[in-house]
Image (spheres, rainbow, N blue to C red):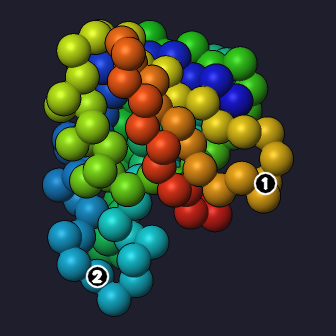
Amino acid sequence: MKLTLSRTSFLDALVPAARIVPGRSPKPILQNVLIAATPERTEVLATNLEIAGRFTVEGAQCDATRQLCLSVGRLIAILKTADDDVVTIDVPETPEDAHATVFFGRSKFKLVTAAA
């Protein structure tokens, strides 16, 4: 799956989702956000088991339907360093590859994904 989106619109969805995600949790999966991408819409979902939030990323383009869990803290830290407004997230099609690669400008970051 290849997901292309605007850095600012992605951050506009991630920042409120990060407020929901607990900083420390006995369940590490709760420190992640679920990115649900389809060719029609891309959403960021977060929960702390008491509150849940669903945020739409405007202007995202995706070539397949896929869901992935990424660490919201690491993702925001990476996006804040971006010098380009166009961000691409590439996820291999094979389930054995549990990573996503974030590209912008000449930068490339590989993040571990959790099972979605």
Left or right, 78 with reference to 62: left
- Corner quadrant of residue 16: top left
Q: Is residue 57 above or below residue 24?
A: above
Residue located at (28% from left, 11% from top)? 84
- Corner quadrant of residue 108: top left
Who is closer to the viewer here, 41 or 71? 71
Q: Locate the N terminus and report the quarter of the image it occupies.
A: top right
**Mark 1 Cα-neighbour bin, 10 Å: few <14, some 14–19, many ≥20:** few
Q: Locate the C terminus and report the quarter of the image it occupies.
A: bottom right
The circle drawn on residue 95 is 1
Task: Report the residue that reaches farthest toward the front.
Answer: 106
- Is there CB contact under 8 Å for labels 1 and 2? no
Q: Position of residue 114 (x, y in %)?
A: 56, 63
Q: Is residue 23 above or below residue 110?
A: below
Residue located at (29% from left, 10% from top)? 85
The circle drawn on residue 25 is 2
Q: Position of residue 62 (x, y in %)?
A: 63, 20
Q: Secondary structure at mark 1?
A: loop
- Asked if one can make out residue 106 in the rendered structure from this viewpoint, the answer is yes
Q: Amino acid at mark 2?
A: Ser
**Mark 2 Cα-neighbour bin, 10 Å: few <14, some 14–19, many ≥20:** few
Q: Mark 1, mark 2: which one is toward the viewer?
A: 1
